[in-house]
Image (cartoon, helix red, strand yellow):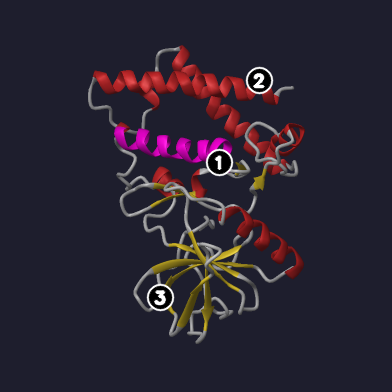
Amino acid sequence: MPCDYALLADETFNIAEFFASEDKSSSNVTIEWVVKEKNSPDDPNSEVYGCGGEGGFGSVYKGVLPDNTQIAVKKPKESDKIRINQEFQKEMGIVSRINHKNVVKILGLCLQTKVPLLVYEFVSNGTLSHHIHDKSSQVLRTWKMCLRIAAEIASSLDYFHSLASPPIIHGDVKSSNILLDDKYTEKVADFVASVLISPDQAAVAAKIQGTFGVKPGSRMTLASNEKINIVQNIVQYFLSSIENNSLRQIFSFRVADESEMEEVEIVAELASECLRKANNEASF
């Protein structure tokens, strides 16, 4: 199974003891592991369901604190400690600035292990990607739910780009980095590719430029060319369905009545305008 961020372990590891001390000048809580259990992040035999230690950045473990609070513990690979420390500081510098209900919340960090660990809130219903591709999932079977999740994602991105100070470019928005909690509320995760934008507008253009369908900063490869072709084909299929009045044929959800169908058409037209604009800008 491919590794999606925060596709968490089926079995938890328990932290026998921990101390949490809150710095009054910061909202971050520092967590120390005092007793390491068999399946703690330092155990080389510990595996994560769906990841098995094979993720690009590392693995994400499900943990349980003594008060039964469930947490997600992000552990990077140990291959390059200098790079790990740089990415750790970068991610901490970004996520510690964020306060939004639709963004996964960081609870603390651990510096007493071989590699630094980030402790996030546990988001129980997996990734949006899982619910898109799992035919048995009923989460995205109604227009109402699809629209709500899409609106929450848009709210997150608006916060990053317009309300955060300085603005944040996530850099890797995709369905496998969108999590759903127990009420199917959307949570944006994984800030490894994210950047903070300086007030210099020239710097903004340099940081966010990229090829349509590929995240900024990615090195072009045969695989990325194939990904571009797939994305462009999907976009063209969607745009054609609007032009040919065949939008209903591509639905994977139920539309309750004509009123909902009108909403679908309005949102589809808005999406088509955004896609055409993005495609035109990427052509220059």
The amino acid type of the residue labelled 1 equals Phe
Decide whether the magenta segment is chiefly helix, strand or loop: helix
Which is more foreground, mark 1 or mark 3?
1
Q: Which residues are magenta?
A: 144-164
Q: Is residue 42 above or below residue 103?
A: below
Which residue is farthest bottom? 35
Residue 152 part of the magenta-drawn span? yes
State if disc 2 and disc 3 touch (CB < 8 Å).
no
User: On residue 160, which mark appears?
Assistant: 1
Q: Residue sitting at 47 percent across and 57 percent down?
A: 105
Distance from the alpha carbon under mark 1 to that under mark 3? 30 Å
Residue designated by label 2 = 280
The amino acid type of the residue labelled 3 equals Leu
Which residue is farthest left? 257
Is 192 on the left or on the right of 2, as rendered?
Answer: right
Element class at badge 3:
loop
Q: Nearer the viewer, residue 80 or 245?
A: 80
Residue designated by label 3 = 65
Which is more foreground, mark 3 or mark 2?
3
Image location (x, y in percent) of residue 252: 36, 33
Is 239 on the left or on the right of 54, as rendered?
Answer: left
